[in-house]
Amino acid sequence: MASGIKDKVCIVGMGCTEFGEHWNQGAEDLMVTALIEALQDAGIEKQDLQAAWLGTCFEEISTGKSALALAQALRLPFIPVSRVENFCASGTECFRGACYAVAAGACDLALAMGVEKLKDTGYGGLPDFGGLLGTLKRLTFPNLTAPGGFAMLATRYFDAYRLTRDQGRETLARISCNSHRNGALNPKAHLRKEITVEQALKAPIVADPLGLFDCCGVSDGAACAIVTTPAIAKKLRPDPIYVKALQVAASSGEEQAFSGWKGTSIETTSRAGQRAYAEAGIKTPREELSLMELHDCFSITEMCTYEDLQISPRGRAREDIEAGFFAREGQVPSQADGGLKCFGHPIGASGIRMMYEVYKQLQQKAGPRQIKNPTLGLTHNLGGFPSSSVVSVAIFGN
Amino acid sequence: MTGITSFGGYVPWLVLERKAIFGAMGWYSPATFGVARGQKAVANHDEDTLTMAVAAGRDCLPGGARTDALFLASTTLPYRERLNAAIAAEALSCGASARVADFSGSLRAGTSALWAALDAVAAGSAGDALVLAADTRLGKMGSAAEHLFGDAAAAVAVGHKDVIAEFVGAACVTADFPDHVRGEADRFDRVWEERWVQTEGYGAMIPKALAALGERTGVKPADIATWAIACPARVLGGFAKKAGIAPERFQDAYADTIGDCGTALPLMMLVGALETAKAGDLIAVCGFGSGADALLFRATDKLAAARTAHRGVAGHLAARRDLGSYERYAVYRHLLPLEVGIRGEANPPTAHSVLYRERQAVLGLQGARCTKCGTPQYPPQRICIHPECGAVDQMEPYGFASRSGTIFTFTGDNLAFSLDPPAVYGLVDFEGGGRLQLDFTDCVLQEVKVGQAVEPTFRRKYLDEQRAVSGYFWKVRPVRGGHPADAGVRDGSAGADPSREVRNPGRVPQGKEA
């Protein structure tokens, strides 16, 4: 049995750009900004990096293929650099590469950089997915979009738990309000306004039953992490953050084509969550976790994730939402930074942007959003669709 | 005995009130007031001649269309080179040995294809044959044709066994009669003066063809129970007087309900006649275009029983929806430049070699069933999808096209490009097992419910205008009745029960698909 990477890797520096519509910056500019912050934070030089991973998803609309975009934008000194992609979970995927390299002893200091430049397509939203799933699916799949894919989760969830469309939508609106309440306090967030439930419910429908405020924004951004061994980390800074677990689960395809899946949960989240808790030694996540940064690409995703990660019992996330369980002052604050909801979702950057918040919170550097004495933070990064997805769950501690 | 063994019809779900056309274009062509009454059947945005022909073929042979020959007649086929009938044959899973041909060039192509099929069967070169006829002709904006034309399809199966209408004989006249002319690149109808067409065309050629038919078969006009003559009603009045035919013996040409559906019209009328004929009735069918074909059939005592298996024309007419506006029609038929946005413009080329390799899956909706655990799955896979099975290479072909399903979940997506926004799609659990993610069509979002019964329908998934490629696949639509076989089908549109969990154990053995 593999021993996992718990406490074998530490984050010693992180950088994150402001997320938003960076009409005057390309992906390369954003990566440089994130790197400079991370190097300063870690107190190292670029020449100290021994390997790097780049996470981007829509390379065709921004960086192009391969890792050369990262290697050349940062002028990395001929070190190994790889580009990884796993849909919207690409950010955590590049972090995984860096962590494994350090845990394996292949290098001492490694960089994980996630970036996405989405605002150069000429339209709002992500490109349609129908064309990104290969030549056969292009002939058969609906021309589905990300909101449409997740809206189907909401349809099923409402139906299964006997919520009327109005009841369901109101609960989802509360989720979005919580994120906006936090995002309003975050200078790096794209959308920094509080919203009301009423406002959310009145917004136009994007993919029924999801309205505009159920959907995360579309932004440009970059975030990066520098990882190293605990021994080196302790020399570099007094408060390194330890990787307690890092697990990925990719769908086998059975949710979409076999009728066992109930359509009210995301199987990959459940599986990656179970493995991450085991790796980190967490028995009762509802009691033990200090905060969570979930992949709230859509409000319904966050709602199901509460249940998939065993925070709320199945079908009962609504009670916790209404009780303020996930608020900044609640028992397990979620989206303390505003989440994808307020940051938008520059695909490759999001997974590392979540870690950035957890990292700052655990170091007690989250300013007005600071949670009281956090010890364990979780990030959840999801790519694909509820019925066919890749999920990474990472847990960090100090 | 050679004759008709089955029939089917297809009329699209959508109709347009002709007064809506006049309301939009009457300012420009006030003379069309005279034709601006009744309704015309309108193909949905994802339908064309080929998809409607396939729908009629499925209605004709609901148990499977494995025939020796498949003839497709139309003047509005999507491809000039690429055998349209071969696409229909894949959709109908006719089998690789079927003799397949397109018949075109004239509105008479429908009757000509039927005649050719009857000859092939009579001669013994084919044991049975399926004839499909469909048209989606376009009149220009402001034309009378825009009012008069309608979209529909008919199918007639021909053979020796269980004949429901015996083939008595046929005759024709042929002349180069350029009444309606479309050149190589024309999308729209162009017609010579109406009075000339009526007098020298219909008025002269149809009587000649019918006279020749009488001579060949020895049947007198008075003996014919039903005249299915594809010709305007006012011209028919003249025949009736001359030939001493009672006007009620003329089969309805669906002018006020469907419109002139071109190549399909004489066959639609034949189907209409078969829907009400008694055993022993003689039915004359006449198709017009560059001359005229006349065919004669005699209904047998097997007709009455065979009727119940099809929606036919009447069944389709019973469940339709008003398209609502002329503008919507204009968009669906690509009459006007539409802002489709950058998403709509994105159109990757079709990988034809992939389509060919997967043609049974894509065009025929063929999946696979694991012979070890019995789980149906789509698309066909080498490794079984059942999480507790996982058998490798133990699959047999399994067709989904003739199975109904229930909606597992769905959405109405306003972001995805669609000519009929929101794009409605979802996951469908098929009767007997198998879950597919499919587009929904012929529905409005507000009426779609979890648990609702749906059926597959062959549609144009995309139109790549840049490369002139019509891409076809299957969607599902709500089951709406009009079909006797629907009696037992649950229609969730009355309000789905949220507690109704759709369960497909995946181990229910089903009859092997033909």
Image (cartoon, coloured by chain):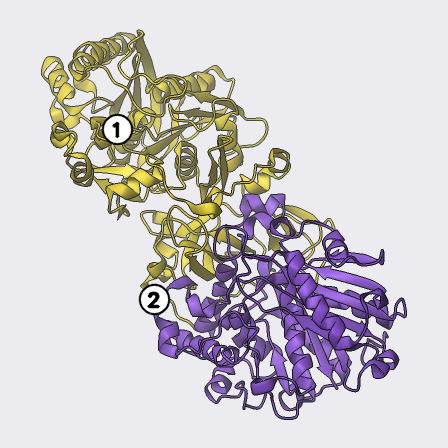
Which residue is labeled 1 in the image?
B260
The residue most toward the right is A105
Q: Is residue A27 left or right of residue B8?
A: right
Look at discs 1 and 2 and give the one toward the viewer: 1
User: Residue B74, how many percent across, how many down?
Assistant: 38, 25
Label 1 Cα crowd, 10 Å radius (few <14 / some 14-19 / many 20+): many
The amino acid at mark 1 is Asp
* Front in this rendered view, residue A245 or B364: A245
Q: Is residue B325 above or below residue B279?
A: below
User: Residue A14, how many percent across, how many down?
Assistant: 71, 74
Which residue is labeled 2 in the image?
B495
Q: Colour of chain A?
A: purple
The amino acid at mark 2 is Gly
User: Residue B228, how many percent across, how many down?
Assistant: 24, 24
Q: Colour of chain B?
A: yellow
Q: Is residue A71 above or below residue A160?
A: above
* Front in this rendered view, residue B296 or A386: A386
* Front in this rendered view, residue A367 or A203: A367
User: Residue A393, how many percent across, how many down?
Assistant: 68, 73
Q: Is residue A242 left or right of residue B357?
A: right
Q: Is residue B315 above or below residue A352?
A: above
Q: Is residue B148 left or right of residue A344?
A: left
Pointer 1 with pointer 2, Cβ within 8 A = no
Quarter of the view holding residue A52: bottom right
- Element type at mark 1: loop
Q: Quadrant of the N terminus of chain B?
A: top left
Which chain contains the residue that carries disc 1? B
Is residue A303 something that shows in the picture? yes
Q: Residue at x 47, y 64 (%)?
A: A151
